[in-house]
Amino acid sequence: MRLVVLESMWNPKGKLLNEEPSVLPYLKAIRQSLAWEGIRINLVYRRFYSHYDLGLLLKEVRRHRKSQVCYIASHGEQRKLTGLGDKVIRLESLIEYCRPSRTTGYIFGACDFVTTDTARKFLEATGARFVAGYQKEIPWTESMLVDCLFLSYLLGGSMKWVRTKHGERVPPLRQTETFEITHTERPQKVAGILYRDFPLAHDITFSCFTLDRQRGRKPRLASSFETYRKSVDRARRLVRDL
């Protein structure tokens, strides 16, 4: 599996020599941890500074015919991302850069960008496997942890949990004293597992959207945020009652 990471500068004034955070060390750690499990991830990392740079990079992403995930990290607002010095990259431009993307799923690590309306427009126009991101303004560190968990679960699976007869949730060990790992290629299910293990993901509106394109029917947008809302609320009630 290939993971393409495209990251903008985080300094809003575009000061290139100022120290700032980067998503790259986190994603390198994920790649290494998955390698321990025998899962090889081809990690490709590039910086972008404007809509022109991002367009060139996404054109190369589009040429890849095998299954892949593209993670775009930048500042965001509704219907637009921002590059170096607050240069605007509008949703319409992104759609053109990503059309078509049948084998690619997109994750946007950006504030306010992946709303229901944006997700529908993006998926209908590009044919992408999925699009994921945040519907509101988000804190950098917490959202980075959420993105890392989602990517780790999507690319390598998640630890299996079972209930004991007393209702306690525990991870069963194999005979080799290693944890059992469950895998699913369904991004909606991965988001549900993420909410179960890390409810903060739902609190900060991380959402995964897919489009159900059944023949003869209008495409139906599925939102993990809405699908799993009741189960997240139920889990919180159980914790409060302990």
Image: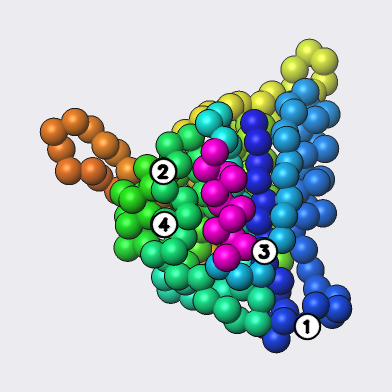
Q: Is residue 41 left or right of residue 133?
A: right
Q: Pointer 4: what residue?
A: 95
Q: Residue 15 has which mark?
A: 1
| Overall secondary structure of the magenta section | helix
- Image marks 4 and 3: residues in contact by CB distance under 8 Å: no
Q: Pointer 2: what residue?
A: 100
Q: Whole-percent x and y of residue 236?
A: 50, 56
> Disc 2 or 3, which lies upstream in sequence?
3
Q: Residues within 10 Å of mark 3 (few under 14, many from 20)?
A: many
Q: Amino acid at mark 3?
A: Phe
Q: Whole-percent x and y of residue 119?
A: 38, 56
3D distance between C-alphas at marks 2 and 3: 21 Å
> Disc 1 or 4, which lies upstream in sequence?
1
> Disc 4 or 3, which lies upstream in sequence?
3
> Disc 2 or 1, which lies upstream in sequence?
1
Label 4 residue SS:
helix
Q: Name which residue lies at 72% across and 81% down.
A: 14
